[in-house]
Image (cartoon, helix red, strand yellow):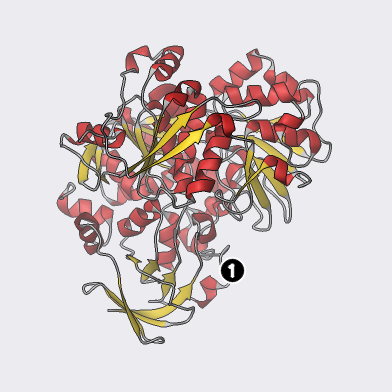
């Protein structure tokens, strides 16, 4: 069970909101890069987020660049999962490849600061603040397996190949 | 039922009867990374202890996003990439070599290929009939090691094109209109497949611009058939042997169809801070522009520079407006020099950058200050993309960009032609 607060963002949060391209020079210095997580969407985010919290987006979360640093800095901030109504495909794959769960569900009713509990096995999100339960779409098997191994690189190390 | 282009290519490369919605493992013909995603790709490769590349001759590293290096940190990243290339024997395109997607189009992509790159605009090679898509560093590191990856076979949307582009209207206007119509997530997880009699009027440079921006509608691929236009381009690139005809079956199943009449299009601009936020250039008259930028994997080709040069011939840029041009490759630069375009543009007040991504992503060569506005021929206008998060980016065609450089405000190119 994952527990934490919701940090709510709107629709079309791009990889430039998550980690602006102008910080590309910090990509080999991850602790410094991570200080800029979500900077162009909420400059205070890095200072407010705590371990276990959730990033909650609207539709088309993570559109834009292929930079894996986007889900990486979100994960480094201690975020336990990203929830959104829909997610851009490269971000989706990148997050799973790093072992960061991405849950597709109707996030309209979730507000900033709500206390959430996520049961990955059952596929439910409980908004404790609102007293509401949501269900999220199941991932394809290959993505569930990658997530279960903590990411793509450990998955390939374990299996030596893709197992469909 | 027949197959879409996406289903055909993924069937061939996975050795299975691939249909939309299936998950397949496909052989990859080319895998690459660039200088802002390459270092993490290499680290993931090393973390996985993968030892050697599956196919060094099908693996490439490109230096384009920040090349030559603008600072110490990126210089160190470049050094690390050079070391990896030396150790593994992969292809390398060092500083000044040009934009990865342009080089892939000029020299590497073939109809029917599967191409993955650690760059979202890898979709560009769909112009040549390759199933090309962007992935992150972990995925590409694994392709480096195994020579294959998994795909969910996408549903395809058919974009049927008819007619001919009018004076002052370019392929960029088509793709901006398309994204404005279907939205920034209108094609998420899907392939855009272009067809119709109007395709004969879209040359490879036009198709590269269109395929390049498929990802701005969320698409996994932007696919063109391989036809006479493709053959002419490959012959011109002295790669005639790479040609094979390739088209979707007549009875392929599409998720939806959108019709576009090229003749009816007008110069179009994407306004801050989203690509789908479009308007006609004429509707934005009076919008002051501090910097005009022509270049990138979207519009840094010879035909783009030629269009700008023809509009600028004998004219000058509006004095306070900066005018930056970055040819997408050395071939483009040399051809533009031979044709006299570079002279015309420099005389008009342009500054020429080395082949590469230049100002596109805010790392160097034209970073925007607080409150500034830029008219760029690139593919993204997200907040903060070109420097200050308080700057404003408008996207348009090279014709619109040149017209805007002359007046210092967003201008429909037909007004100055």
Question: Quick one: B259 or B49, which is closer to the camera?
Answer: B259
Name the image quarter holding residue B330.
Answer: top right
Name the image quarter holding residue A3.
Answer: bottom left
Q: Is residue B89 visible?
A: yes
Query: Could you tell me residue B320's position as x and y percent?
Result: 82, 41
Q: Is residue B74 above or below residue A123?
A: above
Badge 1: how crowded within 10 Å, few (<14), some, or many (20+)? Answer: some
Query: Could you tell me residue B166's position as x and y percent?
Result: 61, 26
Q: Quadrant of the C terminus of chain B?
A: top right
| Chain letter for mark 1 | A
SS at mark 1? loop
Q: Is residue B94 visible?
A: no
Q: Residue at 69%, 35% (x, y): give it.
A: B401
Query: Could you tell me residue B208's position as x and y percent?
Result: 48, 30
Question: Quick one: B122 or B23, which is closer to the camera?
Answer: B23
> So how many labels did they put on this image?
1
Q: Residue at 63%, 43% (x, y): give it.
A: B269
Q: Residue at 30%, 44% (x, y): give it.
A: B154
Left or right: residue B75 versus residue B126 is right
Where is mark 1, residue-wise? A43
């Amino acid at each position: 069970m994952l527990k934490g607060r919701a940090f709510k963002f709107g629709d079309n949060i791009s990889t430039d909101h998550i980690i602006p391209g102008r910080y590309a020079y910090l990509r080999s210095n991850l602790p410094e890069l991570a200080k800029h997580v979500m900077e162009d969407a909420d400059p205070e985010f890095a200072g407010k987020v705590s371990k276990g919290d959730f990033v909650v987006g609207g539709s088309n979360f993570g559109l834009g660049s292929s930079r894996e640093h986007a889900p990486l800095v979100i994960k480094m901030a201690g975020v336990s999962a990203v929830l959104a109504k829909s997610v851009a495909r490269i971000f989706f794959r990148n997050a799973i490849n790093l072992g960061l769960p991405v849950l597709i569900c109707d996030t309209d009713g979730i507000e900033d600061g709500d206390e959430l509990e996520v049961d990955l096995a059952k596929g439910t999100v409980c908004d404790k603040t609102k007293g509401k339960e949501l269900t999220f779409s199941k991932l394809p098997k290959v993505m569930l397996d990658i997530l279960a191994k903590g990411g793509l690189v450990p998955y390939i190390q374990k299996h030596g190949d893709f197992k469909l | 039922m027949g197959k879409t282009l996406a289903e055909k290519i993924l069937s061939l490369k996975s050795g299975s009867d691939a249909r939309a919605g299936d998950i397949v493992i496909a052989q990859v013909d080319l895998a690459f990374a660039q200088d802002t995603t390459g270092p993490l790709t290499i680290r993931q490769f090393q973390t996985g202890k993968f030892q050697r590349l599956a196919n060094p001759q099908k693996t490439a590293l490109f230096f384009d996003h920040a090349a030559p290096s603008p600072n110490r940190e990126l210089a160190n990243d470049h050094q690390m990439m050079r070391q990896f290339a030396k150790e593994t024997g992969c292809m390398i395109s060092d500083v000044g070599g040009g934009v990865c997607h342009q080089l892939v189009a000029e020299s590497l992509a073939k109809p029917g290929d599967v191409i993955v790159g650690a760059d979202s605009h890898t979709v560009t090679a769909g112009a040549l009939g390759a199933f090309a898509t962007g992935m992150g560093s972990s995925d590409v590191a694994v392709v480096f090691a195994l020579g294959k990856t998994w795909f969910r076979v996408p549903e395809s949307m058919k974009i049927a094109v008819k007619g001919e582009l009018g004076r002052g209207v370019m392929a960029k206007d088509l793709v901006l209109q398309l994204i404005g119509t279907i939205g920034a997530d209108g094609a998420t997880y899907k392939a855009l497949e272009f067809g119709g009699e109007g395709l004969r009027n879209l040359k490879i440079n036009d198709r590269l611009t269109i395929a390049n921006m498929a990802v701005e509608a969320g698409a996994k691929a932007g696919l063109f058939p391989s036809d006479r236009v493709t053959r002419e381009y490959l012959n011109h690139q002295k790669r005639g042997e790479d040609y094979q005809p390739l088209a979707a079956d007549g009875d392929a199943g599409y998720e939806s169809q959108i019709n576009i009449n090229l003749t009816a299009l007008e110069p179009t601009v994407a306004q801050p801070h989203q690509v789908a936020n479009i308007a006609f250039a004429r509707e934005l008259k009076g919008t002051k522009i501090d910097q005009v930028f022509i270049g990138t994997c979207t519009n840094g080709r010879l035909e783009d520079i030629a269009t700008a040069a023809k509009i600028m011939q004998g004219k000058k840029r509006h004095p306070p407006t900066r005018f930056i041009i970055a040819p997408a490759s050395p071939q483009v630069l040399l051809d533009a020099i031979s044709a006299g375009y570079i002279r015309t543009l420099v005389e008009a007040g342009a500054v020429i950058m080395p082949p590469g991504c230049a100002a596109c992503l805010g790392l160097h060569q034209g970073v925007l200050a607080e409150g500034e506005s830029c008219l760029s021929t690139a593919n993204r206008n997200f907040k903060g993309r070109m420097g200050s998060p308080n700057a404003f980016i408008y996207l348009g065609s090279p014709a619109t960009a040149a017209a805007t450089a002359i007046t210092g405000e967003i201008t429909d190119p037909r007004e100055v032609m």
